Amino acid sequence: MFGYTEKMRDIAGRLLKECDVEMVIGFRKGTLPMMNEPCFVTTPEDVQSLIWDSNCGINLANYLTNRKEKIAVFAKGCDSRNIVTHIIENKIKRDQVHIIGVPCTGMIDKRKITGMVAGEIMAVVETETTIKVKTVHSETLLNKTDVLQQNCMLCGHRNPVVHDELVADPVDEQTDVDRYADIRKIETMGSEEKWLFFEDLLSPCIRCYACRNACPLCYCPTCFVDEAKPQWLGKGQDPTDVRTFHFLRAYHCAGRCTDCGACERACPVGINMRLLTRKLEKDCQDQFGWEAGLSPDQRPALDVYKANDPEAFIK
Amino acid sequence: MTLVKIDKKNWAKGLTAAADAYRLFGPVRSKDHHRFNELEKGEMPDLNMVNTRLSPKALLFPQSETMLEYSLDESRDDHHIMKAVPKDDSPRAVIGIRPCDAKSTLLVKLNFDTPDVKDPYWLSAYEATTFIGMACDTPLSTCFCTTAGCGPYHEEGLDMLVMDQDDAYLAKILTEKGKTFADAAGWKATSDDTAAFDAGKTEAEGRIVSAIKTDNLADTDLLELHGAHFWDDVAFACLNCGTCTFSCPTCWCFDIQDEVHGKSGVRQKNWDSCMFPIFTVHTTGHNPRDTKTQRVRQRFMHKLKYFVDKYEAGIMCVGCGRCVRQCPVNIDIRRVCEQMNSFKPADACTAQG
């Protein structure tokens, strides 16, 4: 993945020059270590601003909808699954988007790395397998695999599931990944313990809605939290309202979430709301053998009725 | 202005004594960050922090504040009558606020305390509060206070400014409120070491590595800037979340909501954000700021142009860098300010063809 940038600029330049697309959506270098900014380019001259490294965790599928242009987009495995979901849900037509697949070896976890070193991080330099973190006083060399975002550590689809071309050869998929160890642990908790756990999990929430807004699935013209007639939930900091937002949002993502991790990454206060979406992902897997966004030709589990749908969980 | 020297051994003792007369608030560590909390009896503020994750604006302007309460129970004589809720406006002191955050209080005051309109909730809390600032000797690389009308030893908005001198604190008493607090804490040993303060200031200012330019903002034509070519590019990445506005010490917008549970209700004042699509929705359904670009432009134009023109008090930003560090998609106000400040109206004409 390290070293994709030049190839990406070539591809973007070619697509724009040959007028195959009107815009290319990618990332430009951020102003802080471990941050890049989603951006678009519309001319071959501007492609030099495009870059790729292990800080491209924001899901670019979120930027595709409600546009008129023919768009090319760089898509990691998870992004590509969200594009598939957009296609299934009629948010975008397949022929409006040129998918440049990006085989991905995972994005690094800024919050985790910040917690591993003392002092402000001034620079982060990466190679294919290592991350060198420089502070004013020290330099720390980390293995990239140790500091990946949790969703990337658990990822089973690093290669794009749909693409028009690939930036590089596919990478090896991870095998023997136990995606749900932490979820099973919560499942075994008693009600009171669960209550305390979720209370603690969600208590830092400031209701900025960064999680919702970073999510490609959250595209409702008016979100239920913003509805005024009827007003489904209060707008203050009442913990009941905060929890209602998080639980309902998660349910709206059931059978659709690809665990791209954009929600957790975007959260300014470090809430792992993926625990909620992954529980629903696990249920979809267990009940219906369903994994979201793998094929545009298959209707999602919660979108179809089948005579042999399991019903043992209905009590 | 008086200088007082406080032996570090007397710091906790002084705060404990002051706690008899004040509710104390200060930065405390909570997991991986610092936050301003009311200090419990004997609890000391953690001055070993760079700055808090959220600004201390919530001390005067809580994210959610109940203003009025009422009953809908018609069997009661006072049903449907709005009543003020009791509010604790006893003297309080914020210990360890950074100079940038203290300055921001004065910018927010321009909105909440005008000749015509006064916000009683904010104002009564403000008047009850004494601000004991901690000079900032270890700024972050994202701090640009010195070019945002502020600085690591800036005094505006503070009642007392404290600097760390190894085994002692040197405190500059700036107002009557500051003097009253020093008396309550029993900090009386005066000092004439103004040179130490000046040296600390110069040194700390030298550690600020980030800067913005704002010299052209006032003179640039407002409508030309509004129509500048770069707004779509600036706004593209934006998620329209509330992180920047909620973490900002100078963002003051709020929304008023009634919350009813059964037969009792409250009227609340909640933080609002110009990033949210419903911020400007009219009852007709029309939204004058219906697009992301319009909302992002509003935020930057408000901070760096409308405010500048309206108040002639500089920009509506103190350079604390919270929005820079916390924006999930790295939209950087320093970069946007550079684009706005270097904007030439001719560019707009070209862009508009």
Image (cartoon, coloured by chain):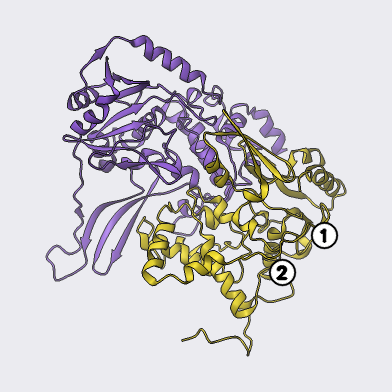
Q: How crowded is mark 1: few (under 14 residues within 10 Å), some or many (20 or more)?
A: few
| Residue A299 at least partly seen | yes
Dot 2: what SS? Answer: loop
Chain letter matching colour purple: B
Question: Residue tagged by mark 1?
Answer: A164
Question: Residue A177: percent from the left, percent from the top?
Answer: 65, 64
User: In the rendered image, which quarter is residue A17 located in?
Assistant: top right
Q: In this view, does B324 lie to the left or right of B100?
A: right
| Residue A303 at least partly seen | no
What is chain A's hue in the picture?
Answer: yellow
The image quadrant where one finds the C terminus of chain B is: top right
Of B146 and B298, the residue lying toward us: B146
In the image, residue A61 sits, relative to residue B168, either above or below, namely below
Question: Residue B312: percent from the left, percent from the top?
Answer: 43, 25
The image quadrant where one finds the N terminus of chain B is: top left
Q: Residues within 10 Å of mark 2 (few under 14, many from 20)?
A: many
Q: Earlier in the sequence, mark 1 or mark 2?
A: 1
Dot 1: what SS? Answer: loop
Please, what is the three-letter code of the amino acid marked with disc 1?
Asp
Of B197 and B297, the residue lying toward us: B197
Please, what is the three-letter code of the amino acid marked with disc 2?
Leu
In the image, residue B283 sits, relative to residue B15, either above or below, namely below
Q: Which mark is residue A66?
A: none
Report whether mark 1 lies on the same chain as mark 2. yes
Of A13 and A196, the residue lying toward us: A196
Question: Residue tagged by mark 2?
Answer: A294
